[in-house]
Amino acid sequence: MIAKALFLRPVLRRPARFFATVLGVAAGVAAVVATLASSRAAVDSLQNAVLDLSGATALEITRAGGLDESEMSRLAPLAEDAWIAPVVETLALCPKLKDGVRVLGIDPLVDARLRDLGPALSERFGGPTGALVFSSLLRGDGAFVPEPLAKVLGLDVGASLELVVAGKPVSLQVLAIVPAPPGTTAFDRTIVVDVALAEELAATPGRIDRIELVPRAGVTTQELLERASALVSPGVAVAAPRNRAVERAGLVRSLDFNLTALSGISLIVGAVLVATTLATSVVQRRPTIALLTSLGASRGQIVRSILLEALALGLLGGVLGVGLGYGGAQLLASSMHATVSTIVWTAPVTRIHLSFDHALIGIVLGVVSALVAAVLPVVEGARTPPIQALKGEAPAFLGARERRIALAVTIVLMFTAVELTRWPAWNGLPVAALLSAFALLAALLPVFAPAIDALGRAVGLLRKAPVPLRLACAALSAGRRRAAWGAGAVAVAVALSIAIASLVTSFRDSVIDWTAQSLRSDIVVRPLAGGSGLPVGLLDPAILDVVGETLTAADLDPTTRVDPYLAARAQFAGQSVTIAGSALRVLYERGGTALLDGEDPTPALKQALEQHEALVNEAGAQRFGWKVGDQIELDARGYKIVRRVAGIVRDYADSAGIVIVDVEDFRAWFPDERPRTIGIHGIPPDRIAAVQASIEDALSPAFHVDVLDNARMRAHVLSVFDQTFAITRALQSVAAIVAVIAVLSVLYALVSERRADLALLSAVGAGARQIAGVVCLQAGLLGLLGALGGVLCGLVIGVVVVKVVNLQSFGWTLAFVQPWSTMISTLFVVAIACTVSGLLPARAALSARPGMALREE
Amino acid sequence: MEVNAGEMVALVGPSGCGKSTLLNLLSGVDRADEGTVVVCGIDLQSATPDEFLRLRRSCVGIVFQSFHLVPHLTLEENVALPLALAGRRDPKRVLELLERVGLDGRRDHFPSELSGGEQQRTAVARALVHRPAIVLADEPTGNLDSHNGAEVLALLDELRVENGAALVLATHDERIAQRAHRIVRITDGAIVPT
């Protein structure tokens, strides 16, 4: 009967109110599920880029910078134990697709045993001799094209597939169209060629990326690992493909962690929203609870009934929230893929999958938040004598003790937050710093009840204050607890937005400053860019010759102007880093690098050039503790490279370690490595356009590359930067939606509670517009208070994120910049959005008959 | 002040004198700052939550001035509510009381579909359904017109007799008070000796 009185019957008689509460719970859950699912999809996308292509491979043999083909002959004794397959991977731009594709070079004689590709083809072409069919198809300049790609490009067997590899146009004949494995995989954007052709395209004759092993019958992976490890050259690693997948996913470890942290913040916003919705829903029925108590209902009976309602709300809201969150994640997918693509090329399209654990997290969040939120008003109700609730809530200002407690809690949480920022990263992750951000958010919440109280007192003292303002403030003061929850939910959402905006603004300003100091070349030659705006692949070495000849023809000495940038993978203390070659002489003479300490880079460049030393990037210095004067020892392609650190440079292009040496030294170790970009410095300003045109003419039609002037290059850098933060912007929208729902939920409750007051206003002559004005004013004040608190808190969290979280995650020092325009626009937009959202509950208030409301009272 | 079984006592006094407070103390929905309140042998100053439950479930029935029916329950369910809260069912008794208050034909209606007089008659039935030893009525006719007021009062009195319950009734209407066995006058929070 109690459940019927408090819960079941009200749901049946006023389903809209119940489902509005369910929707509030669902919005909170959806925010969390959307963030979690997007984040997981990003990491899966990167891991699958490796695992999809590895097929049945049990082990793979790799070395930083690649393997010499002779490594295959060292493995000859394994022929009885395993299938041994060499693999070469390179990137190509598909102009028709306007995006990059992966070119996978394999040995067709053995590869049919390794990958899903073989069985699929043998099935298509019939017969048990799949491998033979497979090998006969791969010949000359031919390629297997995956069905999804063929469909997009409109290709049939025998057609030509046009690609640009290392700046050179290449035409490959389509030998077969490979049926796609189910779902979206890395195969969808991978074309398969013979390993010899791949080596030719990659211009790495005699060098392969890895050797894959599949144990034959009777041989275990462990046995194979032991035998292979004994045979390979020093510095060559034998490991499962999953290790490379994990390493690749590690590239986005910080992104993943920070997105998970954002999920945590969404979780707080969600929990606050769920709590607000539930608390208001329960409080609205406080008189009924009091009546039941006075008629003999025990505390247990009341609590059980309310918890039953909370359980139903939490379950329904959780399930609906999981669905909405999944839908939201689908909307975020393109932003997420844009972000991931700027980190790792050829990651397959980010597919959102609704996993069981995310669904469970969502539903548990809904239920637990609902139960916790319901318990709070129940406990409060149990402490209140029934007579008080029967008489209705008596509006009273907060006592000095309550104000002191709120202040003390806030101060303690703020001190905790400050202390946590001093803690170092845990296992390379900014755990304490993010806890500090949580503590700051928590410190904000106790402030609102006293703030609303103070507003009520202040306006009460202003005898000349407009009547609607005084009425609105009085109503907020009377429903102070609900109002504080609502303002808190708005504040958390706003704080999240402002913190993200602080990070993006600070980062963007730092990148602009950095590009001004470091991107000093007048002209840049680079591979054509794909969909993400990043260049695809490398440059043919012949391009460097063409550029040199063009400059010479223009009476400009290329030796003091051309700066090719080359890079190779290396290892430092067992971890992957980049060793880069750059023309230090050109940088020394023309400028084009910025030291972290802001000092003139000339002495460091001179020393690096003359003493064969190196420059390192800030991220590497943070991660590995490199300091000026330290000796660094790297392993790359069998070499032990030892360099002394001459300087630490600012760099926002890579969060892994980079060691920059002079290009001549680099070429001695990596003679076949091709340039990533070519910078051309020291062109007289009035000749830049002419030289750029000459280079374009000289490279055309043999090469398809981008020849950009300095301004366009900087614009490209900023465009890629903006893409990197696409996901964070999308999350800001989620926070805004949650804030509006929170305000609406609280307002409905406040209007419902003060229905008699509004009816009284109507009875004494207030017009519909005046009543709507009072309700909207309440909404606007609530939004403004929340937004003000959120902006201030968000700024402080922004400082923590920029100065501590970012440094500990990525190793980049950024100057903190206040996002003034976002702060001001957020204040206005939230206040206006909340005021306008007040129209809905105002409409509900106006639709109630005053006589009925007064009689009920 | 003492109230005996079957006795009808009227608490009389001007508004704000303390009539409702005294009734709230007797029903256990409020607690006295000082003094002693004993109802059905339970000392309400030192009563445990279980004793309060026993008081409300078996000893006391309450009629409020503003009815306080549960809006989402039907009349029948509202009347049955005290029994249901105590884990009991007695549909016959509920129907019998609804017949006695003349609302058996509207037992499936919700409170909002009834007039004030009908709502208060339902509240009277609810106050008596669990056969309480004492019925506390706070200005039971205060929100009703004279016709409905007289009807409700007559009902209360009849049912008191039928059920052998004591009735303590707060009113500022002398005519109503005159129907009681005993009148207790209250002024400024104190009983005036007679």
Image (cartoon, coloured by chain):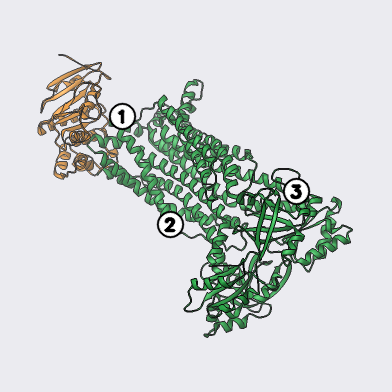
Q: Chain of mark 1?
A: A
Left or right? Give the position of A564 relative to B19: right
Which one is nearer the viewer's eye here, A731 or A805? A805
Q: Amino acid at mark 1?
A: Gln
Instruction: Give residue A11's position: percent from left, percent from top.
Output: 34, 46
Asked whether the viewer can see residue B94, the reply is yes
Q: Which residue is mark 1?
A: A388
Q: Is label 1 in a helix, a strand or a loop?
A: helix
Q: Amino acid at mark 3?
A: Ala
Q: Amino acid at mark 2?
A: Asp
Give the vertical position of A392 relative to A218 (above or below): above
Who's green, chain-wise? A
Query: Which quarter of the rendered picture does the C terminus of chain A lie within?
Result: top left
Q: Position of residue A225 (x, y in %)?
A: 52, 71
Going from the N terminus, do you reach mark 3 or mark 1 first? 1
- For the residue pair A374 and B9, the one nearer the viewer reads as A374
